[in-house]
């Protein structure tokens, strides 16, 4: 028998066309076109059913499936019934998976229109579940911290030092750049209005108080949310995908103590130091504008800043930064531990960590500022 793929036609009945497939129907061969079947059906308009006889078929691969798919699509357009029962079982299963009906079922199930009340209910349920997971995570983190105070937390000191280096020293370049630019912006904005009254010297007050009280802490928190919070989420999410966290649990090691606790400690310790550094760089940025563009004396600017900025402003800013450090670390670790088992889930966890961290920073800033106003601080 020839291995070359061929098509022959027979008519066992007036309204039936039998398509006989012979040879090896593989991509390495020059396969017949489905147009031959279409021409045969168009030549005899009385055909209502198409049968296949694959008995002489030697071998087949995806080339046969492409041919059959085109024939089936043509017959569906001409309302001609297809009999697939005589085809090999493997071919029937693959055709069923690729059928338009099967595809439409999957699409329609995911794209069904929901009513407004159903959407509200789904959103409420998701919010409640997310809140429960967040509270449970915070509770576990608190218990891990209490074990640390008792000296029973299980994590490596080298891991803590490595995270401290990553969140501290390696963050200085980006913190320097952003803080200097923020100081420049504050000085420019203040100078535009103060020049109307000839009070350019008070630019030092605006920059010094603004940076030390809130802006230094906020900008540092936003930077760390985008840099370190995202890094925490990506690291833990990748470990979740690789089942490393499951391996730790199987070994009797708490992931909360071994992975989350060192990251929270490192960021909480480094944030106040980074905030102080950011304050200093922001004041330098304002000093540059005041001396070079507002014709202020260097020592005059220095003494004006010294008289305007008090320890209270520094303590408020440091309190902001400590709270932000906890929030960013919690957000990054929480989203990383909630990560799914795919690459796309790691990307979603990273994005969610950044968004959650920044939103938490804004909300915490509003609450702390309101509290300071009430207490007169």
Image (spheres, rainbow, N blue to C red):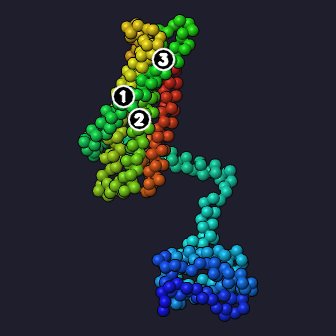
Is 188 drawn above or below residue 330 in the view shown? above
Residue 170 shows in the view:
yes
Q: Earlier in the sequence, mark 2 or mark 3?
A: 3
Is 45 drawn above or below residue 172 in the view shown? below
- According to the picture, the residue beneath numbered tag 2 turns out to be 224
Q: Residues within 10 Å of mark 2 (few under 14, many from 20)?
A: many
Q: At which x and y percent is residue 140?
A: 39, 45
Please state which of residues 123 and 347 is positioned toward the viewer in this rendering. 347
Is 246 drawn above or below residue 62 in the view shown? above
Disc 3, SS: helix
Q: Nearer the viewer, mark 2 or mark 3?
A: 3
Q: At which x and y percent is residue 173?
A: 36, 31
Q: Residues within 10 Å of mark 3 (few under 14, many from 20)?
A: many
Is 191 drawn above or below residue 334 in the view shown? above
Query: Marks 2 and 1, Cα distance to the nearest angstrom?
Result: 10 Å
Please state which of residues 240 and 33 is positioned toward the viewer in this rendering. 33
Q: At which x and y percent is residue 106?
A: 59, 65
Disc 2, SS: helix
Q: Is residue 259 left or right of residue 332?
A: left
Please state which of residues 343 and 77 is positioned toward the viewer in this rendering. 77
Label pair 2/1, CB-CB below 8 angstroms: yes
Q: Earlier in the sequence, mark 3 or mark 1?
A: 3
Label pair 3/1, CB-CB below 8 angstroms: no
Q: Residue at x 42, y 12 (%)?
A: 291
Displayed quadrant of residue 16: bottom right
Query: Marks 2 and 3, Cα distance to the nearest angstrom?
Result: 24 Å
Q: At which x and y percent is residue 340?
A: 45, 54
- According to the picture, the residue beneath numbered tag 1 turns out to be 274
- According to the picture, the residue beneath numbered tag 3 turns out to be 187
Q: Residue at x 25, y 41 (%)?
A: 157
Q: Residue at x 44, y 8 (%)?
A: 296
Disc 1, SS: helix
């Amino acid at each position: 028998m020839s291995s070359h793929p061929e098509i022959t036609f027979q008519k066992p009945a007036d309204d039936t066309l039998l398509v006989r497939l012979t040879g090896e129907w593989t991509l390495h061969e020059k396969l017949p076109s489905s147009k031959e079947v279409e021409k045969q059906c168009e030549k005899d308009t009385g055909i209502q059913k198409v049968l296949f006889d694959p008995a002489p078929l030697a071998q087949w691969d995806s080339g046969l499936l492409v041919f059959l798919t085109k024939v089936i699509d043509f017959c569906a357009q001409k309302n001609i019934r297809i009999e697939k029962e005589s085809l090999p079982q493997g071919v029937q299963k693959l055709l069923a998976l690729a059928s338009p009906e099967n595809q439409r079922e999957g699409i329609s199930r995911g794209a069904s229109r929901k009513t407004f009340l159903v959407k509200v209910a789904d959103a409420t349920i998701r919010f409640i579940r997310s809140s429960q997971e967040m509270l449970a995570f915070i509770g576990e983190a608190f218990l891990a911290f209490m074990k640390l105070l008792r000296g029973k937390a299980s994590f490596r000191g080298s891991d803590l030092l490595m995270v401290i280096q990553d969140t501290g020293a390696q963050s200085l370049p980006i913190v320097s750049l952003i803080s200097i630019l923020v100081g420049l912006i504050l000085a420019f904005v203040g100078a535009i209005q103060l020049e109307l009254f000839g009070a350019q010297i008070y630019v030092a007050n605006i920059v010094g108080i603004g940076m030390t009280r809130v802006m230094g802490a906020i900008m540092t928190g936003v930077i760390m949310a985008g840099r370190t919070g995202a890094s925490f989420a990506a690291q833990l999410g990748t470990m979740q995908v690789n089942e490393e966290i499951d391996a730790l649990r199987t070994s009797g090691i708490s992931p909360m103590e071994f992975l989350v606790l060192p990251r929270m400690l490192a960021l909480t310790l480094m944030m106040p130091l980074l905030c102080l550094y950011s304050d200093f760089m922001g004041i330098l940025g304002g000093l540059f504008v005041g001396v070079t563009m507002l014709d202020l004396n260097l020592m005059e600017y220095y003494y004006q800043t010294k008289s305007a900025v008090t320890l209270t402003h520094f303590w408020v800013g440091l309190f902001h930064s400590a709270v932000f450090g906890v929030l960013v670390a919690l957000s990054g670790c929480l989203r990383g531990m909630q990560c799914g088992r795919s690459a796309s889930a790691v990307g979603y966890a990273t994005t969610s960590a950044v968004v959650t961290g920044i939103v938490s920073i804004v909300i915490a800033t509003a609450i702390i500022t309101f509290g300071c106003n009430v207490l007169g601080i």
